[in-house]
Image (cartoon, helix red, strand yellow):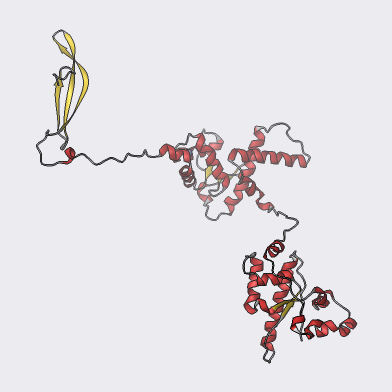
Amino acid sequence: MTAKSRLAPLKGSTIPRLELAGVLEAVRLDKLLQEELEMDLEESLYWTDSTIVLWYLQNTEKRFQTYVANRVAKILEHTTATQWSYVPTSENPRDDASRGMTAEDLVNDERWNKGPGFLYQDRSNWPRQPAFNCAKLEKMAKVKPSLVVYVINTEDYMGKLISYYSWHRIKKAVAWFLRLHQMLRKKSYQRGPLVADELRTAEEAIIRHAKKMLLDDKNTRLGILNPKKSASGLLLVGGRLTNSKHEDCTKHQLILPSEHLVSKFMVDDFHPRAGHAGVEYILADTRRRYWIFKGRKLVKKIVHQCITCRKLRGKAEVQQMASLPESRVTPFEPPFIRVGVDYFAPFMVKRALSQVKRYGCIFTCLSIRAVHIEVAHTLDTDSY
Ligand SMILES: [Zn+2]
């Protein structure tokens, strides 16, 4: 009555997936026929030559990747696993549609017009499908791609690179990178270890990368800083200190965005060098060269996360004290009924022409805070 074939998508899809898509197509076609034919249909029977698809439908144990699971669910919404049977590839008329044939062949072809021969025989003679094998299914379903291609978005290679490093290391990494760049462009380049100039250029390159984010972020109110451009095209704080005798980098700091990893690295770098000092100190320290947007918030966050700072500013634990003894908590007694005693000093006291030692003896009432002090002439028991 009707037939339908579809082209396989150009983008790589595995054979089992294509077969599954084909089976889903059969289900859709059946749905269409049932709706459009004004006849009562009793039962739909489906055949496929794909063992793996049949097993997918029979499987109740394993979970599949989302692609497979979604399609299996759709198929089973409309049919049950028992409606599906196996047809050997040699008897499957599907190939006539997918491989194509001449008009003459099509007219004369028995299989295309009448279906596979076994349909005219008793059901017991129909081809048997391979027994369900869960382990094999799992093995077959895991089709590994033979080639993995990583696509790197060249726009954000810097962001990716940066996320692996700390401030100092990223500077070195970018410096080497820039040297390689010079080498590849066959320009004259520095040999041997990195030099300070190269690190400075690398730092500029990193900050230039961060600048993009600064300009893209609509929430950053650059205007309040009265910014200006440096000779190398970086954004600097304008401010009102132009006539001051400070260094230029302090008067006109480089502007950095608040959310960027570079700003975080910068504070991470300043923080331990400042001996894990407080937020304001670190902020002032960074502002000798850089102006980070919402810098205080960032510094606070980093100080809060720093384990050394936590240890330094941590509160000492307090011992849990036992209950007070009865003598300390009995009310309505005259003072000094129960006392604690201690000695203190000695003090040197002048007596006639010599100096002698005298001690203080302090009596503390245990129930109220009354104190009484006596002089102890010596440390022996009689004197006490
Ligand atoms: Zn710290």
Q: Position of residue 239 (x, y in %)?
A: 51, 43
**Looking at the figure, which quarter contains the C terminus?**
top left
Of 372 and 284, nearer the camera is: 372
Relative height, residue 99 to residue 106 (above, below): above
Q: Which residue lies at the image location 76% right of the left edge and 85% below the top edge?
A: 122
Of 138 and 174, nearer the camera is: 138
Q: Is residue 278 visible?
A: no
Relative height, residue 165 to residue 382 (above, below): below
Q: Is residue 123 visible?
A: yes
Q: Which residue lies at the image location 88% right of the left edge and 82% below the top edge?
A: 103
Relative height, residue 87 to residue 287 (above, below): below
Of 237 and 330, nearer the camera is: 330
Count of residue discs: 0
Q: Residue furthest left?
A: 334
Q: Which residue lies at the image location 41% right of the left edge and 38% below the top edge?
A: 313
Q: Position of residue 321 (x, y in %)?
A: 28, 40
Q: Position of residue 180 (x, y in %)?
A: 73, 40
Quarter assignment of residue 119: bottom right
**Looking at the figure, which quarter contains the N terminus?**
bottom right
Quarter assignment of residue 50: bottom right
Task: Classify residue 256 as left or right of residue 49.
Answer: left
Task: Classify residue 300 as left or right of residue 364.
Answer: right
Q: Residue furthest front?
A: 124
Task: Classify residue 194 as left or right of residue 278.
Answer: right
Q: Which residue lies at the image location 64% right of the left edge and 43% below the top edge?
A: 205
Q: Residue furthest top?
A: 353
Of 309 and 293, nearer the camera is: 309
Q: Position of residue 178 (x, y in %)?
A: 70, 41
